[in-house]
């Protein structure tokens, strides 16, 4: 069936959907605990199946296993994104609306920022972009891959390599830089 989907056979996609959607929806709901989010993820999974059915390799496993892997990965990515957004919302709620500035602390933070920016400038453009999208925009690796139109594995590799390089660059600058990265 997946070969037919890869050739653009919409009926084959409908057949795959009818057969596996209920099972995949149950799996995704157990991960996300939200029917609405699970339905969104399921839609993304079948969109990916439609676009990437040709990538399925029978030598690596059964079609059901591939579908479960896609659904699980997408659900976990969504869970991470939701968690990241809720943590950011909680953090912003906890921040005092009017903060009395401490000149010494402000100067220290400014100096730290300059050191981090200098280290970032020593990364490759690809590594820097991946890290900035992850840490400044709060995107998941899947969202970064989608935005940059790059394979997820490439984004993961660049992010990891960038973090390792940042650790090396900042090790002497910050006490306990390993804890930062």
Image (tube, rainbow, N blue to C red):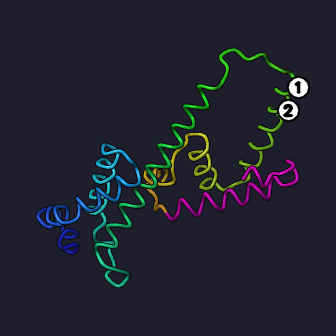
Q: Is residue 58 left or right of residue 130?
A: left
Residue 130 lies, in percent from the top left, at: 58, 51
Quarter of the image holding residue 34? Answer: top left
Quarter of the image holding residue 12? Answer: bottom left
Q: Residue at x 53, y 59 (%)?
A: 155
Q: Quadrant of the N terminus?
A: bottom left
**Callout 2: few (<14), some (14-19), or many (20+) C-alpha neighbours within 10 Å?**
few
Residue 154 lies, in percent from the top left, at: 52, 63
**Callout 1: few (<14), some (14-19), or many (20+) C-alpha neighbours within 10 Å?**
few
Q: Nearer the viewer, residue 167 or 45?
A: 45
Magenta stretch bounds: 153-181
Most frequent secondary structure within the magenta stretch: helix
Residue 117 lies, in percent from the top left, at: 74, 42
The reply to whether callout 1 and callout 2 are in contact (CB within 8 Å) is yes
Quarter of the image holding residue 135? Answer: top right
Residue 34 belongs to magenta span: no
Q: Residue at x 76, y 49 (%)?
A: 119
Residue indicated by mark 1: 104
Residue 44 lies, in percent from the top left, at: 31, 53
Q: How many marks?
A: 2
Q: Is residue 81 left or right of residue 45?
A: right
Badge 2 element = helix
Residue 170 belongs to magenta span: yes
Which residue is farthest left?
Answer: 11
Badge 1 element = helix
Residue indicated by mark 2: 108
Q: Residue at x 16, y 62 (%)?
A: 18
Give me the C-alpha separation between circle 1 and circle 2: 6 Å
Q: Is residue 157 left or right of residue 17?
A: right
């Amino acid at each position: 069936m997946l070969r037919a989907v890869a050739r653009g056979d919409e009926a084959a996609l409908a057949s795959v959907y009818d057969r596996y959607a209920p099972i995949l929806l149950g799996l995704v709901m157990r991960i996300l605990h939200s029917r609405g989010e699970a339905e969104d993820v399921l839609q993304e999974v079948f969109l990916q199946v439609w676009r990437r059915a040709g990538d399925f390799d029978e030598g690596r496993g059964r079609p059901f296993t591939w579908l479960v892997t896609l659904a699980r990965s997408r659900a976990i990515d969504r869970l991470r994104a939701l968690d990241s957004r809720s943590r950011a919302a909680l953090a912003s709620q906890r921040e005092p609306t009017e903060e009395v500035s401490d000149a010494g602390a402000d100067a220290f933070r400014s100096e730290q920022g300059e050191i981090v920016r200098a280290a970032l400038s020593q990364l490759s453009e690809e590594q820097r972009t991946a890290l900035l999208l992850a840490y400044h925009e709060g995107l998941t690796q899947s969202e970064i891959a989608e935005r940059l139109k790059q394979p997820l594995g490439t984004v993961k590799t660049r992010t990891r390599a960038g973090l390792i390089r940042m650790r090396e660059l900042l090790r002497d600058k910050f006490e306990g830089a390993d804890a930062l990265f």
